[in-house]
Image: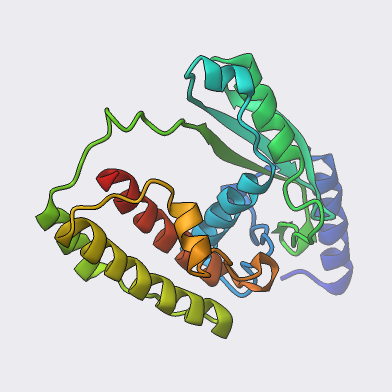
Amino acid sequence: MLNKKGSICFLILLFSFLQGQDVVNYKNVTNKPVFPGCEGFEGKTLDHCNSKITQIELVRYLTYPEKAIEENRSGTAYIKFIVSEDGKIEKPKILRSSKYEDLDSASIRAVSLLFHDKQVIPGKLNDIPVKVFYQVPVKFKLEENSNNQVKLTSEEILNRLEKMKSPDFDNPEAKIFSDNYVKFVKGIIIGFYLKDRRVIDDWEEFFKEHDLNEIPDHTKLTARDKINLGNLLGEINYIKHSIN
């Protein structure tokens, strides 16, 4: 058993060892970094939240290079970066290239801006804040030409609509928006497309006419709200594109 003096010496040696360590792998820290919105989560739930929030945040800063759009190029760049002892995102680097320099550069730029206006809780090893490696895939994918898209049958669309439900939200405004959105979309798709066989050319303009373009303030949503809303809108977009 260590006496008081021995314990102090051990802690000093441990601190010196950690100071000498450049960066610790995300999986090897005692306490993993916590990205904004994931506070209170632990274990695999925290891992899932960190991953989802990072992808949501990337959308704010990711710009698809114009030349890549013109040339119909897509790809995925894997970026590694450091979460510093102060909770800052530092030194983003290419872990695996997308094979296109402009996509890689756009990925680095987006990652460098992650959480720059928010506070990340740094990772710890034995209660001491340390630098932690984290990696994230940055995907570039253009929507396929409508002529090449997989179309859903009427039966498949109805089946997906029946399964579509408004999820639970922490923010009351998000719940109201989601309930109305789901109800409206179901009614429109069933009425316009499945019954009357009419197609809506401009969904965005159509929603604007019906006051359904205002998504709740992103900054007021919890991590769960953002994930649920993202999943819901993703499913609706999939159905919309499959019938146009």
Residue 220 sits above or below residue 243 on the image: below
- Rendered location of residue 110, percent (x, y): 70, 38
Q: Can you see residue 198?
A: yes
- Farthest-out residue, bottom: 172
Q: Quadrant of residue 37?
A: bottom right
Residue 17 sits above or below residue 52 on the image: above
Residue 182 sits above or below residue 11 on the image: below
> Which residue shows up at 89% across the image and 68% down it?
5
> Which residue shows up at 42% across the image and 71% down it?
181
Specify whether 64 is left or right of 234. right
Q: Quadrant of residue 154?
A: bottom left
Residue 199 sits above or below residue 195 on the image: above
> Which residue shows up at 35% across the image and 51% down it?
200
- Farthest-out residue, left: 155
> Which residue shows up at 59% across the image and 57% down it?
53
Task: Name the one closer to the observer, 67 or 225.
Answer: 67
- Rendered location of residue 150, percent (x, y): 22, 37
